[in-house]
Image (tube, rainbow, N blue to C red):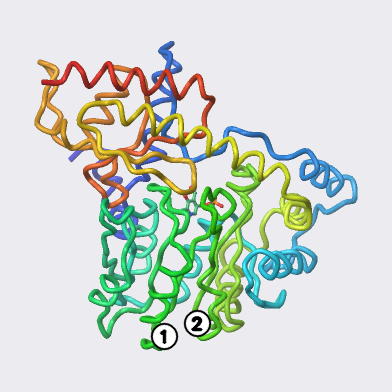
């Protein structure tokens, strides 16, 4: 046995069972090709291409000067938890007190915490697909069982209340979804979420993990609706959000939950043993973000909407691509399965993983295969890039697929 294989055997089973994040893997490969001198257009990462608004950066600088250098309370500074409670009231019609809020190191951390706190081995977690790559792996870490419920392309990639109801069993503990969605950009309307909520009202032991990290990047007229605002479900909905997407603050690592006190207490207990309170300077920056004006956020969203139109329009011109129109977030998610089984004479494209690898190595455009998102016919293209880069990238994709026969 090789040394590496032997070392891998020593790792805990829970780590050997874990998949590597496909988005991070593609981004790493893209960086390597760029380092070799190739002109790579990287559309694999889920990250705004804007800078954090200046007033938020100023708050961080002030926090350093004011001496916020020590450990912070495990659940976050009181002023940040208050700012988040105010934000939930203002934007989401959810009435939580600061004691219901726990701040963590990014929404990813918040989601992982809640799953650890609620899911016992063998418990089922219904995940609305297509879903963000980390959901199923977080459930695996908690020894839960992911039950994937697929939203059809024809229904804008959204799961219906009837589909969800059919998947519920006595072991269902959590239902998990993101709206706006990564990777599809689908936005669940108030009517759709109320219908889903009505089913869940009948099942008292089921909790809802509502991932609202893309809340502000919503192009619909109706806007965002939070399932946590439905009074009958309030105590069973854990609302997860953060600053990464709406305020272009991915590297600052601030996420939060708003939840019933006993769930918030469970998360605080876990966090108290694993990470403690998150970065003090970033917390002060996030406080400014939640208390501040949303003008920059609105401007960024306008740019994402314009790019959505640009990319969707260009993708629709590619023969064989089936293209949805995302209502939010910053991704396009075309179905490229028309090209499965085709070849450029040397490389056979069997699936979306082959498609993305081939595209990266031949056209130097990095995208992410839909397989990791529970949608093996699709690829995810981030639209968080300049208009010129996006137009050039889609042209390269168009030229590349023209060679597949
Ligand atoms: C659907 C979804 N939820 C959560 C996250 C994590 O956000 P954060 O950067 O705050 O951890 C992401 C990031 O890509 C995401 O796409």
In space, the residues marked 1 and 2 are separated at their CA atoms by 7 Å
134 versus 365 height, above or below: below
In the picture of the structure, the residue carrying the numbered disc 2 is: 233
Quadrant of the image occupied by residue 321 = top left
Numbered mark located on residue 201 in the image = 1
Residue occupying the point 32% across, 76% down? 121
* Mark 1 closeness class: few <14, some 14–19, many ≥20 residues within 10 Å: some
Q: Is residue 374 left or right of residue 249?
A: left
Q: Is residue 115 left or right of residue 10?
A: right
307 versus 147 height, above or below: above
Instruction: State yes or no: Cβ of the residue under disc 2 lies below 8 Å from any atom of ligand 1.
Output: no
Q: Position of residue 125 (x, y in %)?
A: 33, 71
Asked if the residue under mark 2 is in contact with the one under mark 1, i.e. CB atoms within 8 Å, the reply is yes
Quadrant of the image occupied by residue 346 = top left
Q: Is residue 88 left or right of residue 1?
A: right
Count of marks placed on residues: 2
Residue occupying the point 38% across, 43% down? 325
Q: Position of residue 203 (x, y in %)?
A: 36, 86
Residue occupying the point 67% across, 62% down? 277
């Amino acid at each position: 046995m090789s040394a590496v294989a032997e070392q891998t055997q020593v790792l805990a089973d829970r780590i050997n069972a874990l998949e590597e994040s496909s988005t991070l893997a593609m981004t790493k490969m893209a960086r390597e090709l760029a380092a070799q001198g190739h002109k790579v257009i990287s559309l694999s990462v889920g990250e705004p291409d804007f800078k954090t608004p200046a007033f938020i950066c100023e708050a961080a600088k002030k926090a350093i000067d004011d001496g916020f250098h020590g450990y912070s309370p495990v659940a976050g500074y009181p002023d940040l938890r208050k700012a988040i409670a105010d934000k939930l009231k203002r934007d989401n019609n959810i009435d939580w007190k600061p004691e219901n809020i726990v701040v963590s190191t990014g929404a990813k951390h918040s989601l992982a915490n809640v799953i650890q706190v609620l899911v016992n081995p063998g418990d089922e977690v219904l995940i609305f697909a297509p879903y963000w790559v980390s959901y199923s792996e977080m459930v695996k870490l908690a020894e839960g069982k992911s039950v994937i419920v697929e939203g059809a392309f024809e229904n804008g990639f959204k799961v219906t209340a009837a589909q969800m109801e059919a998947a519920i069993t006595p072991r269902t503990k959590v239902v998990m979804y993101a709206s706006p969605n990564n990777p599809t950009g689908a936005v669940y309307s108030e009517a759709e979420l109320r219908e889903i909520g009505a089913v869940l009202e009948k099942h008292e032991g089921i909790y809802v993990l509502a991932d609202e990290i893309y809340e502000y990047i919503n192009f619909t007229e109706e806007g965002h609706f939070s399932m946590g605002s439905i009074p009958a479900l309030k105590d069973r909905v854990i609302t997860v959000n953060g600053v990464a997407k709406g305020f272009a603050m991915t590297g600052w690592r601030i996420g939060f939950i708003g939840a019933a006190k006993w769930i918030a207490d469970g998360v605080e207990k876990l966090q108290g043993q694993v990470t403690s309170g998150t970065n003090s300077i970033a917390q002060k920056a996030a406080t400014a973000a939640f208390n501040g004006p949303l003008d920059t956020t609105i401007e960024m969203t306008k740019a994402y909407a314009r790019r959505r139109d640009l990319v969707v329009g260009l993708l629709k011109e590619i023969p064989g691509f089936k293209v949805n129109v995302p209502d939010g977030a910053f991704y396009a998610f075309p179905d490229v399965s028309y090209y499965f089984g085709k070849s450029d004479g040397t490389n056979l494209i069997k699936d979306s993983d082959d498609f993305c690898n081939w595209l990266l190595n031949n056209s130097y455009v990095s995208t992410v295969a839909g397989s990791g998102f529970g949608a093996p016919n699709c690829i995810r293209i981030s639209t968080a890039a300049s208009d010129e880069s996006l137009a050039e990238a889609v042209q390269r994709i168009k030229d590349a697929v023209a060679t597949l026969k």
